[in-house]
Image (tube, grey):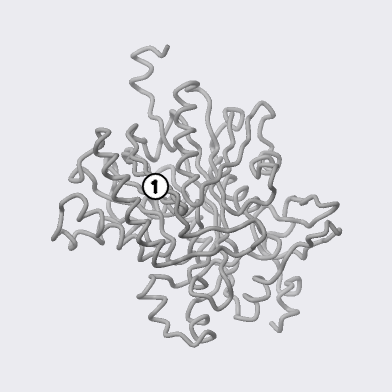
Amino acid sequence: MLSTERSSVMKAGIESMGMYVPRYALDLRELAVARGVDYGKYRQGIGQEIMAVPAPDEDVVTMGANAALRALEGVDRDSIRTVIFATESGVDQSKAAAIYVHRLLDLPPRCRSVEMKQACCSSTSALHFALASCALQPEHKTLLIASDIARYGLGSAGEPTQGGGAVAMVVSTEAKLLQIDPVVGYYTSDVMDFWRPNYLDEALVDGKYSIKVYKQALEQAWQHYVEEGGHAFSSFERFCYHMPFTRMAEKAQSHLLRCAGKCGGEEKLLPMIQSAQRYNREVGNCYTASLYMGLLSMLEQDPADLSGSRVGLFSYGSGCMGAFFSGQVLPGYRDFLNTQAHLDLLNEREMLSIAEYEHFYQSRLCEDGTAQELEVYAGGAFRLQGLRDHMRLYGERQNSLLTELESPLLSLGR
């Protein structure tokens, strides 16, 4: 049993965060020209400008490990007792992606490592499981990784919403960024708005229906949150939403205003969500990482000092499950962010031509277990080296910044 004195000073929540996005991207103006579409359909219609494009030697494991490397800066790795990897882009039907990351980061062996799945909201369930672990063993910390690659068919309606990236968080009783409130509102319903069978590389989605179900899940999760004793709508200064595309946050906020009986308050919509939209607009959908990339964007890009502000967060996973919860930004949070490093990640990416983007898209690992060595592209500290006897091989990237002469893109006409 925790003493009253000890429990009163514990701040359970997010201690640190790190983000990673691929070193390559596609300007959607290029895609608009190639597909014969007005760029405004992308920029104004869905709110997207740039799509992150993983290189052939990048996957959710390497992206997650690279994000975790940033989140673990200044954290005692011996205090990590759990690694939870949330993804819907799993690389193995049995072995958790967390195991690969555990080895790449040289974490202590006395550690449990698991993978979680429920579309885009498994990262939020992982967060609440991590908080429950904090309550049982306050001295132990959890490394939570959300990493995904959003893929749809070339030329499909979903193509401009593609993306990829990872967000890692250390969850502990020493929160420095966001203290999580205990109340959560949930909603689950068996629907088919988005799914990906084991035999397909690309997801199947009914876009209009998915937006309808998203709003339904938001409404029901909010009502449950209120019934459970959550904070009143008027107590929130900011909101973060899962964003399959950036404009979805605006649709969600408008719907929540109506659900909360705040019709006519749309003029307050953008200031409450705008800073959370910045990174998504330049990365695209990253499934389980989307909500938390929005949170990180808000903390790093909001011009106001958010210390003490209460943030409402809505997590949606197709299929479907929704969760509404809240947290309070902690004083001094800016001292524990990696804002410049994350801006450098976004600003220093190499823009691909359409031919290069489609080459990356069509690259695949062998499916018969044949030994395969992948070319080295620009990227973070870790990369997928290849395949041998059906085993994925991961290691450190010797050259994180390739010279022009070493670039495999030369073979595509660069």
Could you tell me if residue 276 is visible in this image? yes
The local secondary structure at tag 1 comes to: strand
Quarter of image, res 187: top left
Give percent across and percent down for residue 61: 65, 50
Query: Which residue occupies 63% across, 51% down?
Result: 90
Instruction: Please say if 373 is above or below 2.
Output: below
Displayed quadrant of residue 245:
bottom left
Q: What residue occupies the far left of the structure in this picture?
A: 264
Q: Which residue is mark 1?
A: 322
Picture residue at 43% right of the left edge, 38% below the top? 14
Which of the 4 image quadrants contains residue 263? bottom left
Residue 261 x/y as whole percent: 15, 51
Tell whether 265 sits left or right of 74.
Answer: left
Q: Residue at x 53, y 43 (%)?
A: 71
Out of 407 and 282, give the one closest to the viewer. Answer: 282
- Seen at 49% across and 88% down, the residue is 36
Above-or-below relation of 140 to 121? above
The quarter of the rendered structure image containing the N terminus is: top left
Residue type of the residue flagged with mark 1:
Gly
**Where is 71 relative to 274, above or below?**
above
